[in-house]
Amino acid sequence: MARWIEPVTLRGTHVLIEPLEAGDRDELAAAAGDGELWKLWYTSVPAPQATDGWIAAALKQRAEAGAMPFVIRRAQDRRLVGATRYFNVAAENRRLEIGHTFYSSSVQRTPINTETKLLLLTHAFEALDCLGVELRTHFMNLQSRRAIERLGAKLDGVLRSHQVMPDGSLRDTCVYSILATEWPAVRSNLAFRLARG
């Protein structure tokens, strides 16, 4: 049976998005180490000692559930600065989720996130013909929620006590989505924001 989401490399002015490989381990750990992102209790960024397991889980999701994990590289020097993923793939409904996303602290609040989302959403809506794309985050992750809302995604609701976090706390999950009918306006917004720097 053919995969709906095939490995693809997405290129922009600021970023290069490539399929995750096991050999990305050291660069991935270094990217997460820029800001010690795993210390943010409301995220699931891998700590250095957990990077191998994180990669194995991502590659298993690709093999068994049709997901597509990516690494994000800064275009100017090809430095790995983050990771993201298409997952919760429902090919029969032409829907997927973009998540498991993190960026090194040194590239946060730069055009890299905006262009990454523009490339991923363009591929989802224009190559995969998605009807909808979801983005989810922890209710307490205000930075992520603001970033998702700036994309133009709409809040569908909050799933309360939805997930048990590594520290045992319960995660309330904010569920956002962008529909195919909304994509032209979202695309214009992202292109405008990128042009403004």
Image (spheres, grey):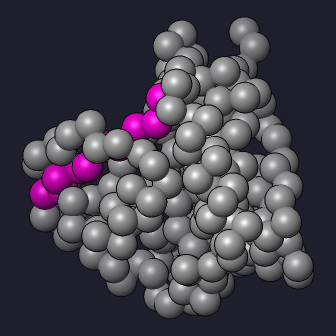
Q: Main secondary structure of the magenta part?
A: strand
Residue name at image x 65 percent, y 30 percent: 125
Indicate whether 123 appears above or below 117: above
Displayed quadrant of residue 3: top right
Q: Quadrant of the N terminus?
A: top right
Is 152 situated left or right of 17 in this image? left
Q: Quadrant of the C terminus?
A: bottom right
**Residue closest to the eye, 169 or 92:** 92
Residue 69 location, x and y as percent? Answer: 64, 48
Is residue 71 in the magenta section? no
Whether residue 20 is visible: no
Residue name at image x 11 percent, y 48 percent: 161
Residue 30 location, x and y as percent? Answer: 65, 84
**Residue closest to the eye, 105 or 65:** 105
Residue name at image x 70 percent, y 40 percent: 122
**Residue closest to the eye, 16 or 29:** 16
Indicate whether 29 appears above or below 84: below
Residue name at image x 29 percent, y 68 percent: 141
Residue 88 location, x and y as percent? Answer: 47, 33
Is 145 situated left or right of 169 in this image? right
Residue 75 location, x and y as percent? Answer: 85, 72
Is residue 177 in the magenta section? yes
Whether residue 168 is visible: yes
**Residue closest to the eye, 103 or 111:** 111
Is 77 situated left or right of 113 in this image? right
Residues shaded magenta: 170-179
